Amino acid sequence: SCQMMQLLMRFFIRRRMLRHPPAPLRVLLLVAAILVYGTTGFLYFELPENPSLTWLDGAWYCLVTMTTVGYGDFFPKSPGGRLLVAVPLMVFGIGLLGYVLSLAASSLVQAKNKELHGMASLSLGGHLVVINFPSLSKVERVLEELAADASFGDRDVVLIDETLEEIPPELAGRGVRFVRGNPTRDETLTRADIDNSQYVVVLSKQPGNPHSDDQNVAITLAIEARQRGVHSVVECVDYSAQELLKKAGCDAIVCTSRFDAHFLSNELLKPGVQEVVDELTTNLRGQQIFITAIERSDGIGYQKVVDHCRKHGHIAIGARIEGEKELNITDDRKLSKGDAVISIGAARLVAL
């Protein structure tokens, strides 16, 4: 038994629990000491006049007095019970209650502060992870577009950025969580719970700077090495970086320079195309382009697909056959399971 006590003492000293006990342990010891003092003191002074009192009655009196509730079902009648037990319980009880409340408030403030500065570890599931913070307006536009689609729902969103010191109030008001750190490191991805995420969007840290693509390639490699099941969309600046991103394993690539050139040339030669494309690609208004997979095992003719789309308020404009898109195709083409119809409509099309 002596050896056991020595081992326990060494353990506590090594852990500094006796020299610097944690706050919950200090509270527990104080509560225990006051309960022991109050219960024994109450019974010592009051038991001779009231033999029916029990240890449970004494402990109950201590609790209601320490918490300032004071039901009045038990109270000391003797001078010793009032001066030596009741008064100390009132004084120390109020002090202990204030101490506990201050600890709770301090813990809440620290937790909120850690969350705002991206130092907390998250445990979510099925959430979206947005990596890099190029600007507030861009991140807000992405979130607005996603929130406008019913399939996205009230999904949690986590923002990862290495240089952002604190999450902007606008994003915090949207319920966006923040993790500060290098997105190529496992520690940062773990704190963002990347293993349980469903979507990842990697934005260019510096729009217009091709060197941002190098970082996005490294981020994509880090993500795909951890979670191949996540659906990842990566933004790139230089068109030539697409090949590297494909090899890194991302599911889709959005090249800003490619679309900038398309819009500039089309707006020059065919004015008004930009507004049409804008309405077809935004979730906030008007009609959108939808790609709906064919689920029938026996396939279906394109003419029947056109009729199905028209019945549900859609216009079929083509199909994705064996991974390749074809627009304005003939009615006699047959679509097989795994192909998809491309249509324009106000809401998502019912599955075929």
Image (cartoon, helix red, strand yellow):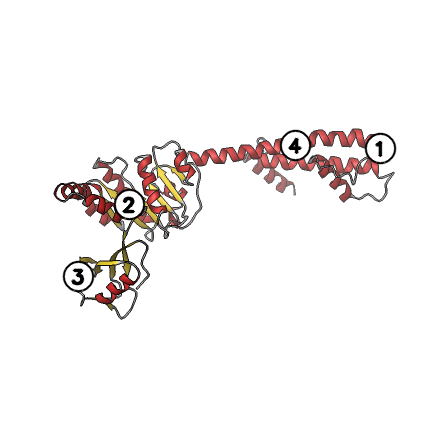
Q: Secondary structure at mark 1?
A: loop
Q: Secondary structure at mark 4?
A: helix
Q: Give the class, few, some or many, for how many residues have Cα within 10 Å of label 2's Cα (few <14, many ≥20).
A: many
Q: Is residue 8 visible in this depiction of the protein?
A: yes
Whole-angstrom CA distance, mark 4 to mark 2, is 52 Å
**In the drawing, what numbered circle is on residue 78?**
1
| Residue for point 37% across, 40% down | 159
Whole-angstrom CA distance, mark 1 to mark 4, is 25 Å
Q: Give the class, few, some or many, for how many residues have Cα within 10 Å of label 4's Cα (few <14, many ≥20).
A: some
- N-terminal of the two: label 1 or label 4? 1
- N-terminal of the two: label 2 or label 3? 2
- N-terminal of the two: label 4 or label 3? 4
List the residue tagged with mark 2.
Answer: 220
Q: Position of residue 55 (x, y in %)?
A: 77, 43
- N-terminal of the two: label 4 or label 2? 4
Q: Amino acid at mark 3?
A: Ile
Whole-angstrom CA distance, mark 4 to mark 3, is 78 Å
- Left or right position of 269 against 17: left
| Residue for point 83% across, 37% down | 46
List the residue tagged with mark 3.
Answer: 329
**In the drawing, what numbered circle is on residue 96?**
4
Question: Which image quadrant for residue 164?
Answer: top left
Q: Secondary structure at mark 2?
A: helix
- Left or right position of 181 against 260: right
Q: Amino acid at mark 1?
A: Ser
Q: Give the class, few, some or many, for how many residues have Cα within 10 Å of label 1's Cα (few <14, many ≥20).
A: few
Q: Is residue 183 visible in this depiction of the protein?
A: no
